[in-house]
Image (cartoon, rainbow, N blue to C red):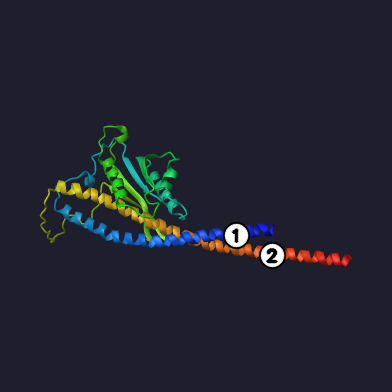
Amino acid sequence: MPSLQDLRRRVRAVKNMRQITKAMKMVAAARLRRAQERVTAARPYTAKFMQILGDAARRAPDYKDPLLAGHERDVNRVERILLVLVTADKGLCGGFNTNLIKAAQDFLRRNAGSDVEMVLVGRKGFDYFRRRNVKIRREHLGITGTGKVSAADAADIARALVADYLSEENLPEKSMVDRVYLLYGEFKSAISQKPVVEQLLPIARIEGMDEAKSGETLVDYVYEQPAAALYGQLLPKLIENQVYHALLESVASELGARMAAMDSATRNAGEVIDNLTLTMNRVRQAKITREIIEVVSGAEAL
């Protein structure tokens, strides 16, 4: 059985740890409220953006864009896929990073017959996959570490992905990418985050892009630019918005997972302190009893 001094030292250590986890929980809760507000504010913008593009696409059915229609791929060529994985830059957020990494591994197994490369956003995903036999095209670190997401960082990531998708097959290391997928943690609530895989390029579907229903009258829009110029500006903006929205969702999910993990750690630390205190009291009582017995035995011997 450990000594009384060791038990007291362990109690002090666990109390200090509980103070740290409690403080981290409070910080995560304060940041989560602001992150949740940003996610809630971004969702209507994304939905409206998709609706406007869908309405415009139905009025220009003859226009074909690689970002919408995709590439014409030779059936004999192995399909090239780019997976963008968004993880956290820090730990101590429960199973948030682990669930995303597992989802990425499942994606790699399902597409084992294709040539899959990864773009890693976040240090946790980069630290994991750089030790594995996985092709990494590039990484973006330190973007979500502060709990805030910059639209400029999302635009840089999106522009690089569009450039990868539209690049010519003139060099093996810069071969044309056939599909781009985005894997991130979707924020449901403070205790619920769901890994989501979305096809980013070619744009899988724009709401309202289907042809007009029977009896529906399409309003005649007047465009200042032709369809090529219009979509040349709007489609890359849509990709930037989708990446930015994914980063916002990921930050909110990370903070929610961290708050829940730190709350659980604080409660567990309290239970450990109670158990150690009970054990410490028993050891002290046994020590006192033993000393009393020694004193009584010595007195009787005299």
Mark 1 surroundings within 10 Å by alpha-carbon count, few (fewer than 14), some (14 through 19), many (20 or more): few
Mark 2 surroundings within 10 Å by alpha-carbon count, few (fewer than 14), some (14 through 19), many (20 or more): few
Q: Nearer the viewer, residue 2 or 179?
A: 2
Q: Quadrant of residue 165?
A: top left
Rendering coords of residue 170 (x, y %): 26, 32
**Which residue sits at x=31%, y=46%?**
157
Q: Quadrant of residue 256?
A: bottom left
Q: Nearer the viewer, residue 66 or 163?
A: 163
Q: Earlier in the sequence, mark 2 or mark 1?
A: 1
For the view shown, which residue lies furthest in the top direction?
Answer: 171
Q: Is the N terminus in the top left, top right, bottom left or bottom right quadrant?
A: bottom right
Disc 2 residue type (three-letter):
Arg
For the view shown, which residue lies furthest in the right direction?
Answer: 302
33 lies above or below 197:
below
Rendering coords of residue 54 (x, y %): 20, 55
**Which residue sits at x=46%, y=52%?**
91
173 lies above or below 110:
above
Q: Is the C terminus in the top left, top right, bottom left or bottom right quadrant?
A: bottom right
In the rendered view, does 62 fall on the left or right side of 129? left
Disc 1 residue type (three-letter):
Arg
In the rendered view, does 167 fall on the left or right side of 140? left
Q: Which residue is mark 1?
A: 12
**Which residue sits at x=37%, y=61%?**
188
Rendering coords of residue 28 (x, y %): 43, 60
User: Disc 2 to disc 1, how far (Cα)?
Assistant: 18 Å
Residue 189 seen in this snapshot: no
> Looking at the image, do the residues carrying marks 2 and 1 touch, with CB atoms under 8 Å apart?
no
Q: Nearer the viewer, residue 195 or 114?
A: 195
Rendering coords of residue 189 (x, y %): 39, 62
Q: Secondary structure at mark 1?
A: helix
Q: Which residue is mark 2?
A: 282
